[in-house]
Amino acid sequence: MFGADPASQIVATVAEAHERLASHEAETAGNEVVQIGALGDAIVAIEPMGWAGSDETVACELSKGGRCAALLVSAYSTSMFVYAAGGELVRSFPVGLYGGELDLGDRLPEEEGLAFDDEFGDHYAAALLLIERLTGARLDREWVLEGRRPAYRRAANGA
């Protein structure tokens, strides 16, 4: 799904993986490093500067036989939350938009009490809590930023 090159594998923190595997060339930067690790019963993929896992088609493929919850945090585009189960898209919506731009669609019961439509709410924290509620995987700062896991360079075309 992520087009990772097995020969490029290193074990590193997310920052080290990005520094060592990303090309840092303007024409190819972004969406080229994926770090994969186990968190309890979940498999977590972290893509510094990447977006493949939040693609609805990829999320559906990854969820065959299970579930896939993805959060794309972007300073340059619309941040997105995507959730698929059993190969089917269950929920997808923009994160961090509010007011007239907001269209959350039909909510899941697990979204109860989360401040996605609150202009002053922490939408990204709400999305991470939703991932925890849907998957049982709790992403904490130490696990995400300091954990050393296998990381790979993605194919040049991002496939």
Image (tube, rainbow, N blue to C red):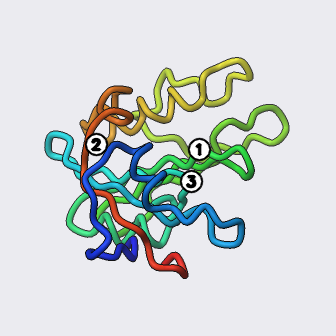
- The residues tagged by marks 2 and 3 sit, at their Cα atoms, a distance apart of 23 Å
Please name the residue that numbered disc 2 is placed on: 135
From the viewer's perspective, is the residue at label 2 or at label 3 nearer?
3
Provide residue 19's location: percent of width, then percent of height.
Answer: 48, 51
The quadrant of the picture occupied by the N terminus is: bottom left
Q: Amino acid at mark 2?
A: Thr
Foreground: 127 or 34?
34
Please say if the residues under marks 1 and 2 sit with CB atoms less than 8 Å apart: no
Please name the residue that numbered disc 3 is placed on: 49
Foreground: 139 or 87?
139
Q: Secondary structure at mark 2?
A: helix
Please indicate whether residue 97 sits to the left or right of residue 141 in the image: right
What residue is shown at x 30% (from left), y 48% (from top)?
A: 12
> How many other residues sit within 10 Å of disc 2, few (<14), some (14-19) or many (≥20)?
some
Disc on the earlier residue, 2 or 3: 3
> How many other residues sit within 10 Å of disc 3, few (<14), some (14-19) or many (≥20)?
some
- The vertical placement of 112 against 147, above or below, is above
- The vertical placement of 90 against 142, above or below, is below
Please name the residue that numbered disc 1 is placed on: 73
What residue is shown at x 39% (from left), y 71% (from top)?
A: 2
- The residues tagged by marks 1 and 2 sit, at their Cα atoms, a distance apart of 19 Å
Q: Amino acid at mark 3?
A: Met
